[in-house]
Image (cartoon, coloured by chain):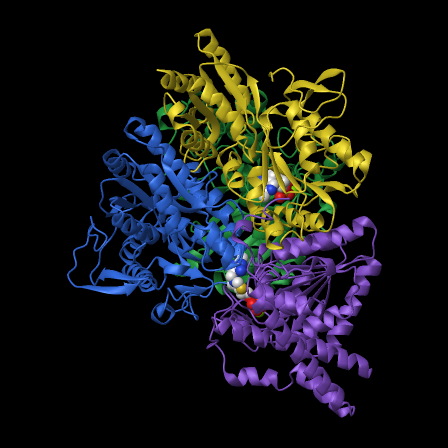
Chain colours: A blue, B green, C purple, D yellow
């Protein structure tokens, strides 16, 4: 499957380019039209059309019963969403960014994720928690957290981290229809990113990674906005004669191990690119999964490009040092291919 | 006073009491694992409150949940089996003492993080309003829960969005070993409602009839006006916080004072006073039989199969 | 009225105003990154409040923090350099606009998670009481912060443990694009204090003298009786939530109404009325010079060295 | 260094056996006697002597000014502790268990861990967050969380997870004296566990792992209470002729990579035992760290024994299936040594 136009279950015709914020808006709007039980709650989602304009026009279309501006009370409205889901609705809870999910994380991890098991299936919790994760430019330490690993480490949750407008829309629709609680990561820096999204309805399946670029020398794996950085690095590597395959995980939990292992078994080398500190990260787990599954197929240990180990400083002169960069990916690939 | 009603409330309270006395015994026999928090002493709150609600109302509480489960009509066999971690339990042994469920009866648990159920219960009620039903939600919490953030956020949203939910603080004067005066600067816990503001009430939780009228009024406010209420029910737990707690932080006298007007005793005497001693003895006997049957059922039930250990994590 | 005091307050408020106007300009020139939240319009709150406190009192606020930093005596050069992410900044470029610090002056930041500073500020005051000092803490927060759990927990502990802290809700009628009526069911935000209960007050935040007396009383209560106070200061931000916000959710008229009694304008006119126009012009000129010097200083300062990127993560 | 009697910086003479709860009590008491700025706050720490009796007698000794019974408001008293630390005190914040730290995690991750960097060193946050982590017997899903990875993943924090009474005492004293915020994990199931603790004062240094058992065939690595399980497994392996070295990490952050790598470079095989789900776990990170550091020294991929991937069911029949067990460790070692 190529970067240009993935095609999981789409059955549409025309293709146009839209921004991620609009892809998300379409996903939510279509699902709300389709299913009366779906509603959206979060800060600024209504009158302001979303802090990042991901719900433009939705208050006008659906009214304040289904598009609900919440006060700043993340534990409260996340918990309320969980209760509403248990009572048969299908809430979409927007965190302005996932930095603020930390004050609601108990409701996600201890209530939503565990309700089904604790009740032996009597309770169902079909809820989507969505919002931007990771750093944007110079927002400082408290607004630059990546909690991918926290949620991906939690049994009971589905965790999605798509990159492209196409995947954002298709996966968000799948998330809304899923009967499990879903954590859905977006990125402040890519809401304006445009890409092909067909007019008609389609879904992208949960749990399926996507090969965004084919290659034969090394497998690069990433998710969320760093897929774009990784693709850029792959282009630069091509100029040096290194053919990189790029896998976009799209789903962190459940991991599509097969797609990953097939690729690494072919290339025998792997570099993972993540915007997370290395310790107890998702990428380190992925590296271990690969290594322990196909140890003998690896020509070199799996490489990891991560955020460096400090809270994020504000100054741009420092922020760029901590975050993964094209150069660091290239260096890591060269090391792995040496 | 309606004699049938008295008999019914007596039966329901006694059923909880006897269920838990047997649970305590099984715990000391090490047949029950984990924590076991007994509701003994507080029965009039759950029984009184739930006796005035509808089938389409939701009920949610904290980890001291056997009483609410039974008062809502939950099966004693399934409850006892749950305590023993059996496949026949009301959560197939996955929940345990703190996490009883009977979702068919809209008994939604049984939750372990203090205060976390407060916004969740608001969500249950929110959903009923959203669907246009006349259902409401009732949410029980301890006096220990009034200082935690989720309590505030839940009440704040309930007030702001006119959510038909009733919050009942079961003030049993202790949060584990901590007496109320160490954690609440006033005697009147319902003043927490003034901040939003929200309707409030205070009730003697040992008086099952007072509880009924108090909850009835709140339920009407919720059902008709879609407005929340915060209620403080003053009550007492006769046992320790959990079976692990010897409760040395209070005297036998303290406990006896509350026991002297024990709601089950009071209603039993009322029945006798009505000249219904025969009926009362019949009830006692029925309950005894039900609970003993529940114990037998639980003991004889199988444990979940090991290969099902990961079941129910996902759909 | 003390003419020197008027001149001093005028100077302090103008200093904030001009600092931020220049910051806004630098932001549009893309010399400042991230978010930039301006305090313009609210200056009388920070200046009035901090003008009656002692050097050993702690000050803490949210991300809209330039005003409080400057009102506490923070250096304008270091502030401007911080905005530009320079090594000479008040947090050496590590904090940014939302995270100014001047710990030597007990200005403790500058925090980005709404409400999280509320318990932390209680801790600052707690420490002073623990040490037996007469220091207190003042903590500013937005109207948007009154629904979050940490607000409740912080106030609850402050009331319970008699902590000498003053909480000032700067009610500027908006939390980002959300007008107050969508998030608070009443006009009087200080009723949140009734829940604990805690002393409370409401003040016109555009009246710097009213702010002074209100805070003076609360500080006395904190210092002498070790008791907390919750204050609502009604004020207004003239600009958008941050530089990214066009503020289309209100009319120019709404803003003009508040601007018509702008505290800086009012004090300037008062000075002129005293016949001190010369003094006022001198102040204007001094401030202009200071701020322009700060801008120059910031622009000419070096960025932190890349090899220091991990510094200060640990001792 | 042997299991029986570690001896980092101890200068004492007599040795006695005491329980972990008493070792912790001694550590706190000694430090509070030594430094007036140290105080203890948490639920039940005073009048009740601690929910697990780790602060027995301390209210009597120090009074309510320094041993403070808190209401159930973890975000509140954790945040208050952070503020007090910034103002020059040295709080010990007890979470009854770390399950309840989740409602306070924002104060730990976004305030305590970041304060120093965000203020460029102006703020200091010398605070210890301590309490029991992990599952005990049949406490159900909400009381069986292991958040080791969440905290270990957070730059700005020190994370300690000792096992023995000796290490508990020595490390808690070091933690209280450290100028960084420290997360200190104990275990409900081992508070009564006894072991040698000398009478005199000693410290155990932060950041130093301990070889609790020497061996030559395989390196077993664990921390917290699972060190005991791992030692048991090592004994059983000895009977089968496999000589296992057992490393007790004691500190998760900063990791003592050298001790780990020296051992694995010697044995060439490694199994990590953790009470955590595998995805995004500390153990998986550790496996990756080892693999990427000494890839060529490994005769087999690093093995991992983890909690299985579901919320913890209550029934003992199921709980034992999910948790690491001696048998699973042995099986994993046999696989790695095959
Ligand atoms: C957030 C949180 N903190 C701490 C605990 C541990 N804990 C369990 S019960 C309890 C006391 C609760 O007292 P109360 O709310 O009065 O209820 P009661 O036990 O009296 O019914 C505590 C502290 C918890 N479960 N959740
Ligand atoms: C817990 C949390 N949720 C959401 C945000 C995003 N956010 C930043 S400022 C803000 C509005 C705050 O409004 P208010 O408290 O009134 O302060 P003001 O901006 O008016 O000074 C929001 C929602 C945040 N920083 N923290
Ligand atoms: Mg209680
Ligand atoms: Mg505001």
Quadrant (top left/top right/bottom left/bottom right) for the C terminus of chain B: top left
Q: Position of residue C242 (x, y in %)?
A: 52, 70
Indicate which quadrant contains ligand 2: bottom right
Given residues B262 and D106, the one toward you in this image is D106
Q: Is residue C65 above or below residue B170?
A: below
A222 displayed left or right of C56: left
* Corner quadrant of residue D56: top right
Q: Is residue B165 above or below residue C44?
A: above
B63 displayed left or right of D9: left
Q: Is residue A155 above or below residue B289?
A: below
Given residues D3 and B92, the one toward you in this image is D3
Q: How many marks?
A: 0
Q: Position of residue B268 (x, y in %)?
A: 62, 37
Q: Position of residue C78 (x, y in %)?
A: 64, 65
Q: Position of residue D34 (x, y in %)?
A: 79, 35
Given residues A273 and B149, the one toward you in this image is A273
* Corner quadrant of residue D187: top right
Judge whether residue C242 can be spotted in this image: yes
**Residue at 27% across / 47% down in the picture?**
A240
Judge whether residue B136 can be spotted in this image: no
* Corner quadrant of residue B193: bottom right
B285 displayed left or right of A35: right
């Amino acid at each position: 499957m190529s970067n240009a136009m993935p095609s999981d279950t789409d059955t549409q015709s025309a293709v146009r380019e839209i921004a991620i914020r609009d892809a998300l808006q379409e996903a939510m709007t279509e699902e709300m039209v389709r299913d009366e039980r779906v509603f959206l709650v979060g800060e600024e989602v209504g009158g302001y059309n979303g802090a990042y304009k991901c719900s433009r026009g939705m208050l006008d279309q659906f009214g304040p019963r289904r598009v609900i501006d919440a006060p700043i009370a993340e534990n409260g409205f996340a918990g309320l969403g969980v209760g509403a889901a248990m009572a048969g609705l299908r809430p979409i809870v927007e965190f302005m960014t996932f930095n603020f999910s930390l004050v609601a994380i108990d409701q996600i991890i201890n209530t939503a994720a565990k309700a089904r098991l604790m009740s032996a299936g009597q309770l169902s919790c079909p809820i989507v928690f969505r919002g931007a994760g990771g750093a944007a430019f110079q927002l400082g330490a408290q607004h630059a957290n990546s909690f991918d690993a926290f949620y991906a480490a939690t049994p009971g949750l589905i965790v999605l981290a798509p990159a492209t407008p196409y995947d954002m829309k298709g996966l968000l629709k799948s998330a809304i229809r899923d009967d499990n609680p879903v954590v859905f990561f977006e990125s402040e820096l890519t809401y304006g990113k445009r890409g092909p999204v067909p007019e008609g309805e389609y879904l992208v399946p949960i749990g399926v990674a996507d090969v965004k670029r084919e290659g034969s020398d090394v497998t690069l794996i990433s998710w969320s906005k760093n897929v774009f950085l990784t693709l850029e690095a792959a282009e630069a590597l091509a100029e040096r004669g290194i053919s990189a395959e790029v896998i976009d995980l799209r789903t962190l939990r459940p991991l599509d191990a097969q797609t990953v292992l097939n690729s690494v078994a072919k290339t025998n080398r792997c570099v993972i690119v993540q915007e997370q500190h290395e310790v107890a990260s998702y990428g380190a787990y992925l590296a271990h999964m690969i290594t322990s599954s196909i140890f003998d197929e690896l020509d070199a240990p799996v490489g990891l490009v991560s955020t460096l180990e400090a809270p994020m400083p504000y100054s741009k002169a420092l922020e760029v040092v901590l975050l993964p960069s094209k150069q660091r990916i290239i260096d890591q690939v060269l090391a792995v291919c040496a | 006073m309606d004699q049938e009603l008295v008999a019914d409330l007596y039966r329901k309270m006694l059923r909880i009491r006897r269920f838990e006395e047997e649970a305590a015994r099984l715990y000391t026999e090490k047949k029950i694992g984990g924590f076991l928090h007994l509701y003994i002493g507080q029965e009039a709150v759950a029984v009184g409150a739930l006796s005035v609600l509808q089938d389409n109302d939701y009920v949610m509480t904290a980890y001291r949940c056997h009483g609410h489960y039974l008062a809502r009509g939950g099966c004693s066999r399934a409850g006892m089996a749950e305590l023993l971690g059996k496949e026949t339990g009301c959560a197939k042994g996955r929940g345990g003492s703190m996490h009883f469920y009977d979702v068919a009866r809209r008994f939604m648990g049984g939750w372990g993080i203090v205060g976390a159920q407060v916004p969740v219960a608001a969500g249950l009620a929110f959903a009923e309003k959203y669907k246009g039903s006349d259902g409401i939600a009732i949410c029980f919490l301890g006096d220990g829960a009034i200082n935690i953030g989720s309590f505030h956020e839940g009440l704040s949203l309930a007030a702001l969005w006119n959510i038909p939910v009733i919050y009942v603080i079961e003030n049993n004067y202790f949060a584990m070993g901590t007496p109320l005066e160490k954690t609440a600067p006033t005697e009147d816990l319902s003043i927490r409602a003034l901040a939003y503001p929200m309707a409030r009430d205070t009730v003697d939780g040992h008086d099952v009839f007072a509880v009924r009228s108090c909850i009835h009024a709140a339920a009407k406010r919720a059902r008709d006006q879609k407005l929340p209420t915060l209620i403080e029910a003053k009550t007492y737990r006769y046992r320790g916080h959990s079976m692990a707690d010897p409760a040395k932080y209070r005297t036998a006298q303290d406990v006896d004072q509350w026991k002297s007007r024990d709601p089950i005793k009071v209603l039993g005497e009322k029945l006798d006073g009505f000249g219904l001693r025969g009926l009362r003895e019949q009830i006692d006997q029925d309950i005894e039989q039900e609970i003993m049957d529940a114990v037998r059922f639980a003991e004889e039930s199988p444990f979940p199969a090991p290969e099902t250990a990961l079941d129910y994590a996902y759909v």
